[in-house]
Amino acid sequence: MRLPHEESRRQTYDGPAIFSFGFRPFFLGGSIFTACAIVVWIAAYTFAEPLIGGRPALDWHIHEMLFGFFAAVAAGFLLTAIPNWTGRLPVRGTSLAVLFSLWLLGRVVMVVPLPWPGLAAVVDCSFLVAFAGLVWREILAGKNTRNLPVSLMVTALAAANIAFHVFANDPAALQMVQRAALAVPALLIALIGGRIVPSFTRNWLVQQGETALPVPAGRFDRFALVLAAVAFAAWMVLPFDMITGFLLLSAGVVHVLRLWRWRGWRTGAEALVWILHVGYGWLALAMAFLGLSILLPQAIPASAAIHALTAGAMGVMILAVMTRATLGHTGKSRNADRWTMVIYGLVITAALLRVASGFAPFALYLPLLIGAGTLWATSFALFALRYGPLLALPRAAD
């Protein structure tokens, strides 16, 4: 059922379909970009190329996965969700095209060295600063205080991007910035995933005639979110402290229990639902692994824990959200076809290989890294091929 204000918004827009809603350009652009960026990073690592875009290759890889790829997907999701939260008109047309152009210019200046590094930093940071300002404007104008934490997290991501450039030559400070930036997607998944996973699960189970439904949100969920926020805050400033390790491990256990309360095991017949549970499960595993990498570093390598969060939680949840949102907002049936099942299988396997590479002997590390990168790039390239026409073209009813 479409709300009246949503219908009026659709009727008053007559520009290019790709700029009619935020999810269209940013989902498509982000998926193409990450497929290409991973190939560039794997090639640089394999052939020992020290620099990409005039910057250390590893720093470029971390920056572009967080402030390039993740930022694009977050923008696509939030620009589409916020109008539903606030009842306000969506950002579309010229405004959306300008915002997307800022993101795209940032990707260009990060890979093509400029004679003025300061200019490249300004261009790259302008997107997230503009996006954060836009999120604040919409949330405050819509008096949507429930989602002020989302505004704060987008602002934190923008601030971390600025700090990434400011502290580019200070390794210790840069590592803290990277941990802060990694905390943002983790907490966004915990916050927003904690809404959509049980909601979509409940809706699907009701349609199947099930009576055993996800436990409604309550104090336990608020406790889980606060614990995750405290654990990641501690990780940012005290990454090797035993207390941080216990906090992260405890957060992982609590979020496993949170996930269990949503009854994901009953959704095996519909991939668009169970993939959300898999993505959230990766988040819980990542927090537990991060804690264990501090408490038992000889057993759990830090790289495995980091990639459980990035390749696992981020990669799987992002594709879960992008596939479902694209189908729903373009008027298609919310069912996973064979291509979508392949996409899910590829990204899950990529995450497993990338995490496994942290445990592997030296001789197997590079093959696992290449395999994980290849599968990641293929999964997002297939998303762009399968869902690209839906994102770029008007709805069938338009």
Image (cartoon, rainbow, N blue to C red):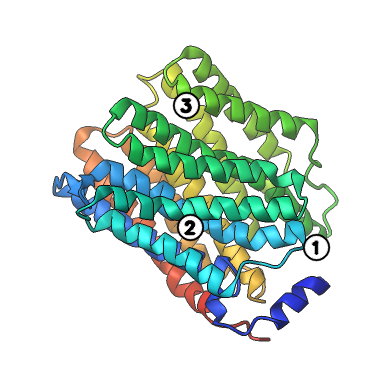
Q: Quadrant of residue 257?
A: top right
User: How far apart, in angstroms, are the residues tagged by discs 2 and 1?
Assistant: 33 Å
Q: Classify 10 Å Cα crowding around label 3: few (below 14), some (14-19), many (20 and above).
A: many
Task: Pick out the residue farthest to the top.
Answer: 242
Q: Classify 10 Å Cα crowding around label 1: few (below 14), some (14-19), many (20 and above).
A: few
Q: Which residue is mark 2?
A: 72
Image quarter of the N terminus: bottom right
Q: Callout 3: helix, strand or loop?
A: helix
For image coordinates 78% across by 50% down, the residue present is 143
In the image, residue 62 above or below residue 239: below
Residue flagged by tag 3: what amino acid is it? Met
Q: Quadrant of residue 329?
A: bottom right
Q: Which mark is residue 236?
A: 3
Q: Callout 1: helix, strand or loop?
A: helix
Asked if the residues shown at circle 3 and circle 1 are in contact, with their CB atoms under 8 angstroms apart, the answer is no
Q: x%, y% of residue 74?
A: 54, 54
Q: x%, y% of residue 173?
A: 36, 28
Residue 50 falls left or right of residue 258: left
User: How far apart, in angstroms, are the residues tagged by discs 3 and 2?
Assistant: 23 Å
Residue flagged by tag 2: what amino acid is it? Ala
Q: Classify 10 Å Cα crowding around label 2: few (below 14), some (14-19), many (20 and above).
A: many
Point out the tag, 2 or 1, that comes first from the N-terminus.
2
Task: Mark yes or no: residue 338 visible.
Answer: no
Image quarter of the C terminus: bottom right
Residue flagged by tag 1: what amino acid is it? Gln
Point out the tag, 3 or 2, that comes first from the N-terminus.
2
For image coordinates 70% across by 52% down, the residue present is 139
Residue 361 falls left or right of residue 296: left
Q: Which mark is residue 207?
A: 1
For image coordinates 37% across by 39% down, the residue present is 164
Q: Quadrant of residue 261?
A: top right
For image coordinates 26% across by 33% down, the residue present is 169
